[in-house]
C-alpha cells in the first residue's frame, strides 16, 4: 500500500488509476527521494508525531483534571489506561486494514477519528465524555503509525531506508518522551483543556491536506475478516496491557504497593487467549487469510529486532515513569522542573535520529546497535548512583547517555526489522512492531515500578526512611537495566544487514520466508 502526492489540478470526473508501485529492482537506486514522495512522507510524519504525542501528554495533567472534574486518582488514571488499551486492541488488526483499505481511506479514517476525539476532549463537560474522546483519539493513533511505516518502507528505495526511518524514529521515540514536557509547559500558563485545543487546528489542517493530496498506489485485497481472530486479538492484547498496567500500580508507586491479585488473573487470561490467537493465525496463514501473519518471524533479522525492541522500548517507557517518581518524591522537584530536566534527552534523541539513519545506510545495523546499547549500559550505571541529595545534573547526564544510546538503537531496529520482510508481509510486520511498542511500554513500566516498590519496601523493612527506600529501589532497577542492556548488546551481534540496503546488491531479504503463492493468487486483488 503506497502513497504519493498529486499536484493541484481541476476536479476529475473519473477516478484516477493508481500509480504502480516503484520497481526498485529494475531501476538504479536514486540518490534522493522524488519531491512528491518526500512531501507525502513529511505530511505523514507530522500527522503521526501529533497523534503519538497524545499518548503521554496527559501524564502530568491528571491532578488538574481530578480537581476540575471532581474525580479520584483511580478514575482519572483511566484516561491513560483506556488510551493504551484501545491502542493494544486496534493496532494488531491494522495489518488487515491496510490490505483492505486504500492509502487515502486509511489516512482519512485515522485522522478523522483523531480529530473528532480531540474535539470531544476539548469540549468534554465531565469525565465520561472526556474518556470517550480519549478512546476515539487512540483509535486514530493506532492506525497512523503502521500506515506511516508500511508506506515508507514500500515507497522508499532500500538504499534510502535508513535516513527516512531515522525521521520516523523521531516520531516513535521522541513524541512519547517529550509528551510530559510539553504538557508541563502548557499547564504552567493555560488550563488543561488547551492540551487538546492547541492540537485541534493542526489535526484539522493535516486531515484536509492529506485528503486532498494523498492518492492510492498499489493493490488492495478483499480477503474476509476473521471475526474470531478479531475477538481473540482484542481480548488477548487488551488483557495483557491492562494486566501489566495494573501491576505497575497505574504508573503510581504508592498504588503499586497495594496491587491486588486481579492484574495477575487478567494477565493469565490474556496469555491463554493470545495462545489461541497464535494457533488461529498459524492455521489461517496457510491460505493467506491471517489477521496478523506470523510468517514475519521466519526472518531472523525481524525476530531479533523485535526482541531488542521489546527490551529497549520497555526501558524507555519505564524510565519515563521512574525518573519523575524519584525526582518528585525524593528531590522534591516540581512538574515543570522534572519536564525540563528530561527535555534535553528527548531533543538529543530527535536530533540524532536522522544522522543515525544516514549512518545505517552506510554501515548497516551492527556498528550502531552495539555502541548504542553500551551507551545505554553506561547511562543506566550512572543513574544507579543516585541518592537522596543527588544533583539534577547527574540525572540529566545519565538520561542523555541513555537517550543517545536509544537513538543509535531504534532507527536500525525499525529499519532492519521491516526491511527484512517481503512486500506481502510488510503491513503485518508494521502492525506487529506497533503492537510490540504498546506491550513493551506497559511491561517496562509495570516491571520497573514493581521492582522499585519491592526494593523500597525491603530497604524500609531494614530501617530506611521512605525517601531512602525509593532511592534504593530506583538504583537497583537501573542496575538491573544495565545488565539487560549488556545482554541486548550480545544479541545485537547476530543482527545482519539486509540485502539491498545501503546500496548492497538485491532488493529484498533472502532471510524472509517465501510466500506460499504469488500476490493475487488465491484471493481477489483489485487496483484502486
Image (cartoon, rainbow, N blue to C red):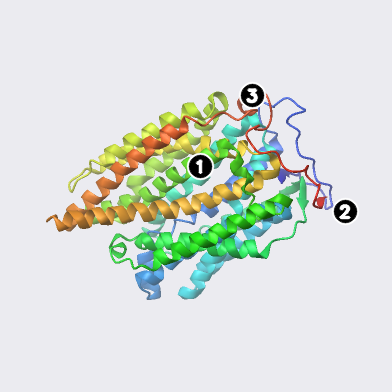
Q: Residue at x 27, y 37 (%)?
A: 382
Above or below, 29 relative to 353 = above
Q: Single out the residue that lies furthest toward the left.
A: 463
Label number found at residue 90: none
Above or below, 411 relative to 212 = above
286 and 481: which is toward the camera: 286
125 and 376: which is toward the camera: 376
Q: Residue 354: x, y in percent?
A: 52, 34
Q: Residue at x 62, y 36 (%)?
A: 419
Above or below, 39 relative to 121 = above
Res. 195 visible in picture: no
Count every numbered label the image shows and give the total. 3
Disc 1 element: helix
Label number found at residue 170: 1
Distance, label 3 to label 1, CA atoms, is: 24 Å
Q: Nearer the viewer, mark 3 or mark 2?
A: 3
Residue matched to label 2: 14
Distance, label 2 to label 1, CA atoms, is: 39 Å
**Earlier-in-chain disc, 3 versus 1:** 1
Disc 2: CA contacts within 10 A as few (<14), some (14-19) or many (>=20) = few
Disc 3 element: helix
Residue matched to label 3: 503
Q: Quick check: marks 3 and 2 in contact, CB under 8 Å?
A: no
Q: Nearer the viewer, mark 2 or mark 1?
A: 1
**Earlier-in-chain disc, 2 versus 1:** 2
Q: Is residue 41 left or right of residue 520?
A: left
Above or below, 4 relative to 23 = below
Q: Nearer the viewer, mark 3 or mark 1?
A: 3
Q: Residue 199: x, y in percent?
A: 53, 57
Amino acid at each position: 500500500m503506497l502513497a504519493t502526492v498529486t499536484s493541484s489540478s481541476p476536479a476529475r470526473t473519473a477516478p484516477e488509476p493508481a500509480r504502480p508501485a516503484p520497481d526498485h529492482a529494475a531501476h538504479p537506486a536514486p540518490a534522493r527521494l522524488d519531491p512528491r514522495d518526500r512531501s507525502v512522507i513529511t505530511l505523514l510524519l507530522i500527522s503521526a508525531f501529533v497523534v503519538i504525542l497524545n499518548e503521554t501528554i496527559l501524564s502530568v495533567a491528571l491532578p488538574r483534571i481530578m480537581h476540575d472534574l471532581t474525580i479520584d486518582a483511580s478514575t482519572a488514571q483511566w484516561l491513560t489506561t483506556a488510551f493504551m488499551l484501545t491502542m493494544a486492541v486496534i493496532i494488531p488488526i491494522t495489518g488487515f486494514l491496510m490490505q483492505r483499505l486504500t492509502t487515502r481511506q486509511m489516512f482519512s479514517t485515522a485522522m478523522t477519528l483523531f480529530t473528532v476525539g480531540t474535539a470531544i476532549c476539548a469540549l468534554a463537560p465531565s469525565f465520561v465524555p472526556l474518556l470517550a474522546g480519549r478512546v476515539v483519539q487512540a483509535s486514530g493513533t493506532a492506525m497512523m503509525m503502521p500506515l506511516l511505516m508500511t508506506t515508507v518502507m514500500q515507497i522508499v528505495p532500500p538504499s534510502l531506508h535508513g535516513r527516512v526511518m531515522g525521521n520516523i524514529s523521531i516520531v516513535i521515540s521522541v513524541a512519547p518522551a517529550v509528551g510530559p514536557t510539553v504538557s508541563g509547559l502548557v499547564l504552567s500558563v493555560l488550563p488543561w483543556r488547551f492540551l487538546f485545543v492547541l492540537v485541534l487546528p493542526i489535526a484539522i489542517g493535516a486531515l484536509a491536506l492529506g485528503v486532498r493530496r494523498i492518492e492510492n498506489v498499489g493493490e488492495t485485497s478483499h480477503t474476509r475478516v476473521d471475526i474470531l481472530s478479531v475477538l481473540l486479538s482484542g481480548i488477548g492484547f487488551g488483557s495483557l496491557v491492562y494486566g501489566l498496567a495494573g501491576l505497575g500500580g497505574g504508573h503510581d508507586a504508592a498504588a503499586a504497593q497495594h496491587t491486588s491479585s486481579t492484574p495477575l488473573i487478567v494477565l493469565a487470561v490474556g496469555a491463554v487467549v493470545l495462545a489461541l490467537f497464535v494457533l488461529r493465525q498459524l492455521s489461517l496463514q496457510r491460505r493467506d487469510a491471517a489477521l496478523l501473519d506470523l510468517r514475519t518471524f521466519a526472518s531472523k533479522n525481524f525476530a531479533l529486532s523485535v526482541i531488542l525492541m521489546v527490551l529497549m522500548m520497555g526501558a524507555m517507557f519505564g524510565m519515563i515513569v521512574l525518573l519523575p517518581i524519584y525526582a518528585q518524591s525524593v528531590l522534591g522537584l516540581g512538574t515543570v522542573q522534572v519536564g525540563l530536566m528530561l527535555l534535553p534527552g528527548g531533543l538529543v534523541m530527535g536530533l540524532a535520529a536522522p544522522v543515525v539513519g544516514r549512518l545505517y545506510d552506510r554501515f548497516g545495523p551492527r556498528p550502531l546497535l552495539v555502541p548504542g546499547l553500551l551507551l545505554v549500559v553506561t547511562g543506566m550505571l550512572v543513574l544507579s548512583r543516585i541518592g537522596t541529595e543527588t544533583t539534577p545534573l547527574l540525572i540529566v547526564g545519565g538520561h542523555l547517555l541513555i537517550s543517545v544510546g536509544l537513538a543509535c538503537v531504534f532507527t536500525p531496529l525499525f529499519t532492519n526489522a521491516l526491511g527484512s520482510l517481503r512486500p506481502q508481509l510488510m503491513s503485518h510486520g508494521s502492525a506487529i512492531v506497533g503492537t510490540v511498542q504498546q506491550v513493551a511500554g506497559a511491561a517496562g513500566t509495570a516491571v520497573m515500578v514493581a521492582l522499585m516498590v519491592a526494593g523500597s519496601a525491603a530497604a524500609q523493612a531494614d530501617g530506611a526512611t521512605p525517601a531512602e527506600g525509593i532511592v534504593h529501589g530506583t538504583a537497583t532497577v537501573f542496575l538491573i537495566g544495565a545488565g539487560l542492556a549488556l545482554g541486548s548488546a550480545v544479541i545485537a551481534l547476530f543482527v545482519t544487514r539486509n540485502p539491498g540496503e545501503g546500496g548492497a546488491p538485491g532488493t529484498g531479504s533472502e532471510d524472509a520466508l517465501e510466500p506460499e503463492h504469488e500476490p493475487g493468487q488465491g484471493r481477489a486483488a483489485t487496483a484502486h
